[in-house]
Image: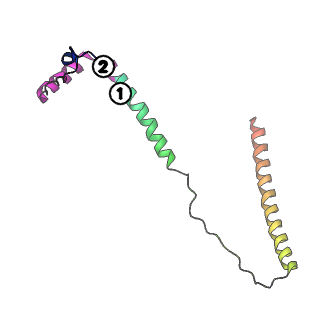
């Protein structure tokens, strides 16, 4: 840094004078008088579109993301069950699961046939 000219370029910068509300209003009126209706329409679209998209993303982010309350039923068994009883219960549960899976497969096959019939 130059020591001799330090005062010339390191002094405090002057701040602009505060303007009055009347001067601000006059500037806003002059600015709006220069704009055509097409520019105002384009400005409105430029403001509304991103605002709408952000609002939709926020609204969508709050819907259907958490499962509702679920009831979980717990079965209580006696502590002295035999292995045969346990295996029989497991077979019954497995048969229920397989029946549900086959029903779901049947529903998907029906949907596939309906879509094939429509040409999709």
Rendered location of residue 65, percent (x, y): 56, 52
What residue did someone put label 1 on?
44
Query: Is the stretch drawn in magenta largely helix, strand or loop?
Result: helix
Contact between labelled residues 1 and 2, with CB atoms less than 8 Å apart: no
Counting residues from the N terminus, which is met first, the one under dot 2 or under dot 1?
2
Q: Disc 2 to disc 1, how far (Cα)?
A: 10 Å
Q: Nearer the viewer, residue 89 or 16?
A: 16
Q: Secondary structure at mark 1?
A: helix
Res 9 → quadrant: top left
Q: Please state the horizontal and vertical placement of residue 23, each as a whole percent of the image.
A: 13, 24
Residue 35 percent across, percent down from the top left? 27, 17
Please report the bounds of the magenta region as a residue range: 12-40
Which residue, as the protein is rendered here, is positioned at the far right? 84
Determine the image quadrant of residue 8.
top left
Residue lying at 83% horizontally and 76% vertically, measured from the top left? 86
Report which quarter residue 37 is drawn in.
top left
* Residue depicted at 79% across the width and 63% down the height: 97
Q: Which residue is mark 2?
A: 37
Q: Residue furthest front?
A: 3
Please give the name of the residue rendered at 37% of the width and 22% of the height, measured from the top-left corner.
Answer: 42
Classify residue 20 as left or right of residue 108: left
- Horizontal side of 3 relative to 72 (left or right) equals left
Taking the magenta stretch, the answer to whether it contains residue 54 is no
What colouring method underlies this structural image? rainbow
Query: How many neighbours does mark 2 have within 10 angstroms: few (below 14), some (14-19), or many (20 or more)?
Result: few
- Nearest the viewer among 35 and 11 is 11
22 to the left or right of 75: left
| 10 Å crowding of disc 1: few (<14), some (14-19), many (20+) | few
Residue 22 belongs to magenta span: yes
Q: Quadrant of the C terminus?
A: top right
């Amino acid at each position: 840094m130059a020591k001799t000219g330090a005062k010339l370029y390191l002094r405090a910068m002057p701040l602009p004078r505060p303007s009055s509300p009347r001067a601000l209003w006059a500037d806003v009126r002059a600015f709006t008088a220069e704009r055509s209706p097409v520019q105002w329409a384009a400005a409105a679209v430029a403001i509304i579109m991103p605002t709408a998209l952000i609002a939709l993303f926020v609204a969508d982010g709050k819907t259907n993301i958490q499962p509702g309350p679920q009831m979980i039923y717990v079965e209580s068994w006696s502590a002295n069950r035999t292995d045969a009883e346990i295996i029989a219960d497991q077979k019954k549960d497995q048969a229920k699961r397989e029946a549900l899976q086959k029903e779901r497969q049947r529903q998907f096959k029906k949907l596939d046939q309906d879509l094939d019939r429509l040409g999709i």
